[in-house]
Amino acid sequence: MNKTSLRLIHLHRSKAVTRPLIRKILSKDPYLENIYRHDPSALSQYLSLTSPRAFQLYQDLHNPQLIQTIKNDCQTYHVITILDSTYPPLLRTIIDPPYVLYLLGNEKLLTELPSLSVVGTRNPSPEAKRKMNKIITPLILENWVIVSGMAKGIDGIAHQLAIENNGKTIAVVGSGFQHVYPKQHVNLFYELARKQLIISEYPPNIPARRHHFPERNRLISGLGTGTIVVEAKEKSGSLITVDQALDQGRDVYAIPGSPLFEQTSGCHKMIQDGAKLVQNTHDITEDWTNNQGKWCRILSDNTECKLVNGTKNEFHV
């Protein structure tokens, strides 16, 4: 890892920074050298910050204990930044990409395609797993990467289906790795860390907070070539992920269900609004072709993009 990437990890840890501020600093100081040379007053003027915020930034940039903590974390976990060549290509295309990612597990999964983001309710209907087994398991068996959020309900089922079928799955979590959330998924967390991949944009010592989950949803949708909603109520956090997927130019799918289950009402509304209705796996794969184990996306002019053997991203979004 080069020095600029290490400085970006350090900057990202400051209590004073936000993603817009990091963007501003990088535009002024691409190698992140000058910010270490300014005192609080100069930082305030340089970055148009309030005095307390500039002072907090100065303290964090010159805090030896924080610097040592970062060094320890970089030895314990794999940490990548948007400046690194190993940064996931699909996330570079989204409007608000994370500047730093913490990884636990098989980092190679970040570059493997196609990938499907699976979202839905934390309180699924009795038929949810059967629907997922019918539609998503064939994708797992065809080496699609399943991306979800390790929440209760649909997320957990999606990860378990991938594990049970010797497939590939990525969990995007809303807390640092030292604070597993939800607690019911501690065993799943460690199972994913052994053979799959867990990622977070939050440092290891940061617990789950309410606003983290809408934030992490943009990464769930961003890491998928499409997003499928299995079950969701009309007013559901899953539909935030759908909105982000649409903003990111991703395909959006919804599985219909019985009108007797409130958990399917959001999917039905999505279909009314233009999401693709999915009754079987072919409804997802019909825009793709599998040529000797290599998946290719069929483009609008009926040509194939070059793709996707797990080492190179040439997926067109």
Image (cartoon, grey):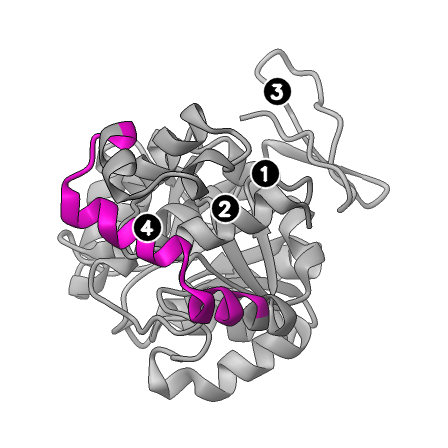
Dot 4: element: helix
Distance in Å between CA atoms under marks 4 and 1: 23 Å
Q: Give the camera-side residue of 196 and 103.
A: 103
Label pair 1/2, CB-CB below 8 angstroms: yes
Dot 2 or dot 4, earlier in sequence: 2
Dot 2: element: helix
Q: Is residue 39 visible?
A: yes
Q: Main secondary structure of the magenta part?
A: helix
Q: Amino acid at mark 2?
A: Leu
Q: Amino acid at mark 1?
A: Leu
Distance in Å between CA atoms under marks 3 and 4: 49 Å
Per the image, the residue denoted by label 2 is 8
Q: Give the camera-side residue of 208 and 239.
A: 208
Distance in Å between CA atoms under marks 3 and 2: 37 Å
Q: Quadrant of residue 274?
A: top left
Residue 180: x and y in percent read 40, 80
Give the foreground label among 3 and 2.
Answer: 2
Dot 1 or dot 3, earlier in sequence: 1
Give the foreground label among 4 and 1.
Answer: 4
Depicted 306 relative to depicted 13: above or below: above
Per the image, the residue denoted by label 3 is 299
Per the image, the residue denoted by label 4 is 58
Q: Give the camera-side residue of 99 and 71.
A: 71
Residue 143: x and y in percent read 70, 55
Label pair 3/2, CB-CB below 8 angstroms: no
Dot 1: element: loop
Depicted 13 relative to depicted 22: above or below: below
Residue 262: x and y in percent read 15, 63
| Residue found at x 30% / y 36% | 20
Per the image, the residue denoted by label 1 is 83
Q: Is residue 87 visible?
A: no
